[in-house]
Amino acid sequence: MADDIINRLQKTKTIGIIGLGDMGLLYARKFSAAGWRVIGCDREDKYESMLEKFAANEQFEVLRNGHYVSRRADYIIYSVEAENIRKIVETYGPSTKVGAIVGGQTSCKAPEIEAFEAVLPEDVDIILLHSLHGPKVDTTGQPLVIIEHRALEENTTFVNALVSCLMSKRVYLSAKEHDKITADTQAVTHAAFLSMGVAWKEIHQYPWETPKWTGGIENAKINISLRIYANKWHVYAGLAITNPSAKIQVLQYSKSTSELFTLMIQGKKQELKERIMKAKDFVFGHLSDSHQLLLDDDILERFSLSKTPPGGRQPNSHLSLLAIVDSWSKLGIVPYDHMICSTPLFRIFLGVTEYLFQSPDLLQECIDVGIDDTAFRHDDLEFTIAARNWAAIIEFGNFELYKKEFESAQEFFEPMLTEANAIGNEMIKTILQRVKERGL
C-alpha cells in the first residue's frame, strides 16, 4: 500500500475498537504505533484503569463505552466474544457514525453479519477481519482474512491501508468460505487437545512429569494442549458453538475416537488397520514420495517441558491423532487445501499427524500398541470420555458448561502454562520457517 495513501487517510480517519481484550489491544497497539488515530473502550467498570494504563499513548484514546466510539470512528471493530456479538451490536450499533464501516474479529462470521445486517442502517459498510493467530504471536506473515461483505471501493482501500501495518498475509474470502475453512482447520484440532487436557486432569497426571509421555510427538501433544489452555475459554467456545460446520466436525471426532477405541479393546487389529490405512490414503494419499515432512522427531525433541533427561520413547496408540485423521476422512476434508488460512497451532498439529502417518513403522506401532498393550488403555479411556463430553457440550451450545470444563482443566495446568507458552512460541517459529521453505 502506497505511503501517500496511508498518510492521507491517517489525517482524516479514526479507528474505533469496541472490546479491549487481548486481540483488541493487539490491534489498538499496532494501529496506533503505525500512526493511526485510535479510540477504544472496554466494559465501563474498566474505564478508569484503562484510562490510566494508556494515558501516555497520544495516538490511542480510551473512551467510556461503545456509544462514544461508534459516533466518532470511521471504522469500528467489534473485538468481543462470539456469544455476545448480537447483544453488543444491538447496544452500540444505533450510535454508528453515518457512512462508517463496521467489522468484527470473531472466529465465526455468520453471527456477526446477522447482527450487523439486523441493526445497522444500509449506509454503513461491513468489512470483517479475522487474524488467524493468538495475541502473543507476531502478526508478520500470519494469515489475515478480510471479508468485504458490503463495501464501497474507497472503504475497501481504507481498510487495506489500515491493516497493511500488521504485515500479515491477506486472504480475501466470503463469510461462508471463511466459516467452513476455520471449522476445517480448527474445530477438530481444538477438540482433540481440549480432550487431551481433560483426560490428564481426570487421571491427575502432569504429562511432563510422567516418564511414559516422552518423545517428540508427546512433546508436541503436551505443548499444543497447554497452549490452548493458556488462552481464554471464549476463544475456542465461539468457534465451536456458533459455527454449524464446527459442530458437525466435533461430533464426528468424538464418534471416530469411540469407534477406534472400541476396535482396540475388542482386539480387532485387521479391521483397525484397514480403517486407519483408508483414512491415511484419503488425507495423505496425494503426497509424493519426495514430499518433505513439516516435522520430524529430531525437531520435536527440542521442545520438551520435562526437567529430566529423556528416558527413551514409550510406544503409544496415539488414539487422539488417529481419530483426527479418521474424522477428516469421514468428513471428506483434506487439510492441505486450507493451508493459506491455517493457524500456527494447526500447522504444528498437521506436521505431527503427517509425521505419524507418513512413518510406516511408527503407524504400525500405534496399531500394535492399541491392540496388544494396555499401558495407555486408561489414558485412552479417559480421552474417549472427554471427547464425548466436549461433543455433548458443543452440540447443546452450552457456553457456561464449556467455560466450566475449560477453566477446570486450565486451573489444573496453571503451574506450567507460562513456560509452555514460551516453548510453544519456539515451536511456532520452527513450523513457520518450514512452511516458508516449502512455499505453503
Image (cartoon, rainbow, N blue to C red):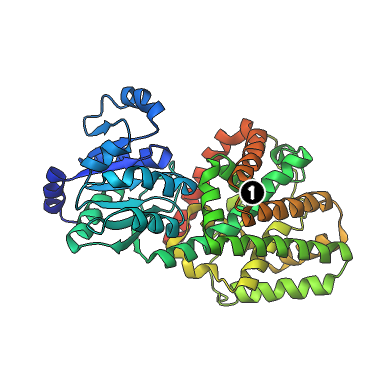
Q: Which residue is drawn at 42% across and 44% down?
A: 80
Q: Could you tell me residue 129's position as x and y percent?
A: 35, 54
Check disc 1 and give the amino acid type. Leu
Q: Could you tell me residue 30's position as x and y percent?
A: 30, 41
Q: Which residue is drawn at 52% across and 38% down?
A: 422
Q: Between 334 and 423, which is closer to the camera in this rendering? A: 334
Position of the C terminus by quadrant: bottom left
Q: Between 384 and 76, which is closer to the camera in this rendering? A: 76
Q: Could you tell me residue 168's position as x and y percent?
A: 34, 54
Q: Can residue 142 be seen in this view?
A: no
Relative side of 40 to 220, left or right: left
Callout 1 environment at 10 Å: few (<14), some (14 to 19), or many (20+)? many
Q: Which residue is drawn at 87% across and 54% down?
A: 374
Dividing the picture into quadrants, the one containing residue 276 is bottom right
For residue 288, above or below residue 364 = below
Q: Between 73 and 215, which is closer to the camera in this rendering? A: 73
Q: Is residue 389 visible?
A: yes
Q: Residue at x 77, y 72 (%)?
A: 273
Position of the N terminus by quadrant: bottom left
Residue carrying label 1:
194
Number of numbered tags placed on the structure image: 1
For residue 13, above or below residue 149 = above
Relative side of 248 to 78, left or right: right
Q: Between 197 and 311, which is closer to the camera in this rendering? A: 197
Relative side of 343 to 270, left or right: left
Q: What element carries label 1?
A: helix
Dividing the picture into quadrants, the one containing residue 145 is bottom left
